[in-house]
Image (spheres, helix red, strand yellow):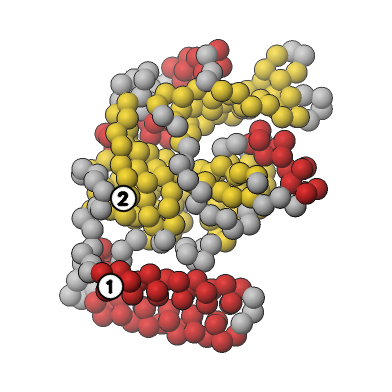
Amino acid sequence: MHSYLRAIGFSELKNESETEKLLNEVFHDYTDREIAKGENKTVFMQMKKEYAPDMGIMICGDLDGEGFHRQYYFPYYNGSSVTTTEEVSIEKRVDGVSYAGVFDDGRVGVSIIFYVQNSAEYRREQILSQIFQRKMTTTLSGLSTGGVILFPVQKNHEQIDLQQKSSAKRNQLLSAAKNGDQEAIESLTIEDMDLYTMIFRRMYMEDLYSIVDTFFMPYGIDCDQYQIMGNIQSCERVVNSATDEKIYQMMLECNDMNFDICINEKDLVGEPEVGRRFKGVIWLQGQVHFE
């Protein structure tokens, strides 16, 4: 049973038989369907059923002369805007049936790995993309099973402008360092040492979350799970049409990167509002768009 089903409003599922009943409902009453050429004269099919705006369950499998053979399923939440235009590499996951995407973004400082939602579209488009060298953009989203709401760090306009300029300068240095600029590498090294010293000194007198505004870092052994803290840009509470459980959908700004997350009201500590911060662990998903 998928542990993140509760993030979209299915927290009361008790066993596999209840989950199978839910998946049969998705199969027989899906909202949308995508198909692509499969292997060994089969058709790869992706069916999803929406239980709230941009949120639901997706099942994937192969269709042949004997019928549909489900390979996997997962809860999904679609993001609302493009998160990055960086080049994305997509590979099959260890299970051999689903896909993972990875890209490097200087705003975060680590390679970001996410679970690809639109596998069928990717299978259809990858050949054309290779032929015509089409660009890709990525929309990220996250599902969370636990989080807390924190108050924001108070800043004046001068501090906000200084932070934006500093962030833009760091991104330029990271881009230059990737291209082998030794001066940029040395500048980044000195900057990181100064930052470490400043944080270590301030931690004696201040709370850590008043020093660190946002963060985005890998979490646990699963490569597509992250612990994040981000500023809430928008927030909406929706209701799962099947269970009546309430779900919060939020857009976050985290390390200058915007993406959406959803979390069950039962799993959230605090009241989310625009301007406050969300801190929690997310399962990162994404849609790859072909231009």
CA–CA distance in space, label 2 to label 1: 19 Å
The answer to whether the residues at label 2 and label 1 have Cβ atoms under 8 Å apart is: no
Residue 203 location, x and y as percent? 24, 73
Residue 25 location, x and y as percent? 50, 14
Q: Amino acid at mark 1?
A: Gln
* Residue 20 visible somewhere in the drawing: no
- For label 2, the SS is strand
State the residue at coordinates (55%, 82%): 185
Rendering quarter of residue 126: top right
Q: How many other residues sit within 10 Å of disc 2, few (<14), some (14-19) or many (≥20)?
A: many
Q: Amino acid at mark 2?
A: Ile
- For label 1, the SS is helix
State the residue at coordinates (51%, 49%): 82
In the rendered structure, the answer to whether residue 266 lies left or right of residue 86 reads left
Rendering quarter of residue 152: bottom left
The answer to whether 205 is drawn above or below residue 230 in the figure is below
**Numbered-mark total:** 2
State the residue at coordinates (67%, 39%): 122
Residue that label 2 marks: 232
The answer to whether 63 is drawn above or below residue 287 in the figure is above
Residue 104 location, x and y as percent? 57, 61
Quick one: label 2 or label 1, which is nearer the N terminus?
A: 1
In the rendered structure, the answer to whether residue 245 lies left or right of residue 98 reads left
Residue that label 1 marks: 159
Closer to the observer: label 2 or label 1? Answer: 1
Residue 78 location, x and y as percent? 48, 37
Q: How many other residues sit within 10 Å of disc 1, few (<14), some (14-19) or many (≥20)?
A: few
In the rendered structure, the answer to whether residue 288 lies left or right of residue 250 reads right
State the residue at coordinates (42%, 40%): 143
The answer to whether 152 is drawn above or below residue 130 in the figure is below
